[in-house]
Image (cartoon, rainbow, N blue to C red):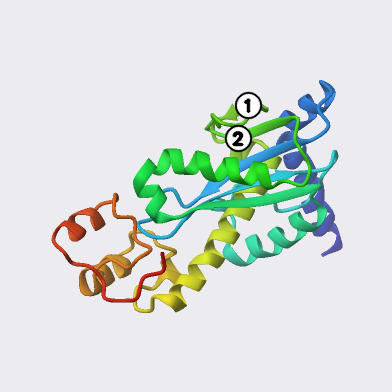
Amino acid sequence: MKKNREQYLAEEKVRLTAMSLYESQAFSEGCRFIAGLDEAGRGPLAGPVAAAAVILPPGFFLPGVNDSKKITGPVRAELSVAIKQQALAWAVGFVFPPYIDEINILNATRRAMSAAVRELQVKPDLLLIDALKINDIAIRQQSIIKGDSLSISIACASILAKVERDAAMQVYDRLYPGYGFARHKGYATREHLEALTRLGPSPIHRRSFEPVKSMVGENKIGLQPGLF
């Protein structure tokens, strides 16, 4: 067992060193504080979009860190706690359904990222962002396609964003029972679509997303009390 653990840690060291190349390059260029950014919740029919910003110390090593989509819920939760403990700074921004419907999901995602950066207690020199750029932040930025698999900072941000958004959906599940938000987190599962047909949209459904948009047009509005 000890040998297996040592082998696992050695393999993780190699993998995470490869995931730290963007950060290592930036540190070598004189950057002191590098923030990784990623989002969670662009695709669901309900709930907010969340974005996290994380500034890690040089040499950060946390076995198991990866793209949040490749990690189970319990492991994500454990890693989230460790990331928060070891990070130099972290923050999460949310944009909620009414504003998503007003400005569209892409702009809402950028707005959530911008909010997360502005909430950081340490001002970053560089932003490493998964596949996007933020228009209203005057900080050097680097957009990395599939960044949550290639940058350790972005991977950590993806974990925090996912865990924090999932926690929000647990709260919404209690506020709006019957939809199953705690299980599907607002994504278009069969359970969710059946609940939508039965109950109509809740106040946290995105009215610019189909099939919610069509249901609103047909006046199939849920009767539960509003949140916004």
Whether tag 2 and tag 1 are in contact, CB under 8 A, the answer is: yes
Left or right of 178 in this view: 64: right
> How far separated are the C-alphas under marks 2 and 1?
6 Å
Depth check: give the residue in front, 151 or 30: 30
* Residue denoted by label 1: 142
Q: Where does the image place residue 130, in percent across and percent down from the top left?
A: 57, 36
Residue extending farthest to the left is 218
The quadrant of the image that shows the N terminus is: bottom right
Q: Position of residue 23 (x, y in %)?
A: 75, 32
Left or right, 52 with reference to 78 = left
Residue ID at (77%, 24%): 25
Q: Residue at x 85, y 58 (%)?
A: 3
Between residue 150 and residue 14, name the one nearer to us: 150
SS for dot 1: strand
The percent position of residue 227, horizontal first and vertical second, equals: 41, 69
Q: Secondary structure at mark 2?
A: strand
Residue 85: image quadrant is: bottom right
On screen, residue 6 versus residue 79, left or right, reads right
Amino acid residing under circle 1? Gln
Displayed quadrant of residue 78: bottom right
Q: Amino acid at mark 2?
A: Ile
The residue lying at 34 percent from left, 61 percent from top is 205
| Residue at the spot of label 2 | 129
